Image (tube, rainbow, N blue to C red):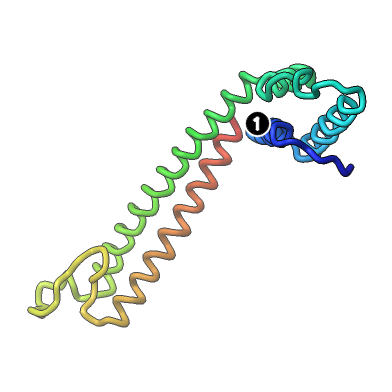
Amino acid sequence: MNLKLTMKEKQFLNEVLEELKQYQVSSKSRNNIKQQILEHIQEAREHGQDSLHELGDSTTFVKDFLDINGIDLHAKMTKMRKSDKRMGILLLTGSLSFIFTYLASQLILSMFLTESFNPQYTNRSFDYHIFYQISDHTWWNFMLIIISFSTALLVSVLTVKLFVSKIRGW
């Protein structure tokens, strides 16, 4: 459909499509609505009427569309808020499990695979730090950090997946 839209019509159409996208209306439904609005604008022009006056403002149009199609606006907003809260909880859970696992792994590896905690080992130039310096050998330190990082990443991903499956089960 080759139809030249005015700025107001383009703005109205974009606002409607953005609001529908915000309410998670499928792209197929949004395309159908776009076609219907364009057809309405064309018919209104043919009859010499103001197309936007009949449609009203974009918010009212979207609310009417949602009411007609049986989509509960309040439930959608509540669901969107809950999903935002869940995302924050998932991020916090993943971050905390990553940090805890990394530190625990670093501590265990430094206790059993390095001489850092050996009371007879004295190296005055070595400065132990659980985050990044658990061995005085650079290559060994790097390998242990990679092992700790990989373990922490795996555990945090599994924790988040378990948490997501638990949430969906509710």
Circle 1 sits in a helix, a strand or a loop, which is it? Answer: helix
Q: Is residue 112 left or right of residue 96?
A: left
State the residue at coordinates (84%, 21%): 49
In this view, the residue in front, 148 or 132, is: 132
Residue in the foreground of this view, choosing between 58 and 97? 58
Quadrant assignment for the N terminus: top right
User: Looking at the figure, which quarter contains the C terminus?
Assistant: top right
Give x and y (percent) for residue 164. 55, 41
Vertical placement of 38 versus 146: above or below?
above
Give the residue number, with chain letter if any, for mark 1.
Answer: 19
Residue 75 in picture, x, y percent from top left: 63, 21
Given residues 105 and 30, the one toward you in this image is 30
Tell me if 98 is positioned left or right of 65 in this view: left
Left/right of residue 139 with respect to residue 30 in the rendered view = left
Residue at the (55%, 37%) spot, across then down: 166
The residue type indicated by label 1 comes to Glu
Residue in view at x 45 percent, y 52 percent: 156
Asked where in the image residue 10 lies, by quadrant, the reply is: top right
